[in-house]
Each structure stands twice: as structure tokens, then as C-alpha cells.
Amino acid sequence: MKINLGHLKYAMDSPRGAMMISLYRMANIASRARKKSPVHNLWAAPLLAAYRIATEIIFGYEIPAACHIGEKLFIDHGFGIVINKNARIGRGCRIRHGVTIGCNTLPNGEQGPSPV
């Protein structure tokens, strides 16, 4: 797996945002790995549990590890951010505090992707 930390140079104006993005990227790698093989659950499940506790309980934001976020995401302040797991956020997006990104509801009532 390729790990790209180029976003850190872009996000250093907001250390909290850089930390949020870095935690998300690590959790996203774990989320993708555990879908490939059940063996990866040995290391991915504890990491994902720690990620969820840290983000939702300690830091107060919700960015699911399974959502798709492009490169050069910039998060200002990072308080009260909620992103749906089906959201697809493109390259170079900037998110400020208090933002909720939901999803589209499909005709059958299920949650669908929500491109941003």
C-alpha cells in the first residue's frame, strides 16, 4: 500500500486539522486492508476502535474510516465535523468547523454516495 503524507505540508497552517487528516488516512488504510483479508483484522480492528474513540469521544468529530477523501484536504479548526461514511470528497476540498456532509438517499431507501 502506498502512503501519501503530502497533505501535511498543505495542512500545517492548522495543526489540529493536520492531525485529523493523518488519523483518518491511517484508519482508512486499516479499513481497506481488513476488507481484503480477515487476517488483517488482527491489527486493523484495534486501530479502528482506537480511531473511533479518539475522534468521536476525545476530539469531537466524525470522519468514518471507510469514506473516500481525495488529496489535499484542508480542515480549519476541526470542531463539530460530521461526514457520512458514503461521502466522496474530492481533491483540494476545504472543510471548516460545524460542517455536516450527509448522503443521497437512493430510490430503494438505502444510503448512496454523496460526491462533494
Image (spheres, rainbow, N blue to C red):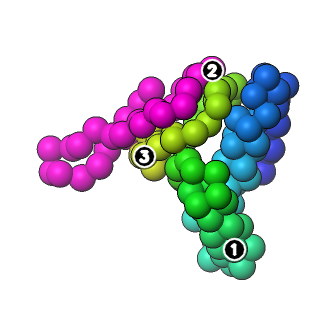
Residue 115 as seen in the image, left or right of residue 17: left
Q: Which mark is residue 46?
A: 1
Q: Amino acid at mark 2?
A: Gly
Q: Is residue 35 above or below residue 27?
A: below
Q: Position of residue 88 (x, y in %)?
A: 48, 36
Marks 1/3 in contact by CB < 8 Å: the verdict is no
Q: Earlier in the sequence, mark 1 or mark 3?
A: 1
Which quadrant of the structure image shows residue 52? bottom right
Assign a secondary structure to mark 3.
loop
Q: Residue at x 48, y 34 (%)?
A: 98
Is residue 7 something that shows in the picture? no
Residue 84 tag number: 3
Q: How many marks?
A: 3
Q: CA distance from mark 1 to mark 2?
A: 30 Å
**Residue 38 rendering spot, x and y as whole percentages:** 62, 76
The quarter holding residue 74 reads top right
Q: Which residues are magenta?
A: 88-116
Label 3 crowding class (10 Å Cα cut-off): few <14, some 14-19, many 20+?
some
The location of residue 26, given as percent across then percent down, is 73, 52
Asked if labels 2 and 1 touch by Cβ distance under 8 angstroms, the answer is no
SS at mark 1 in the image: helix
Residue at x 42%, y 30% (from the top left corner): 115
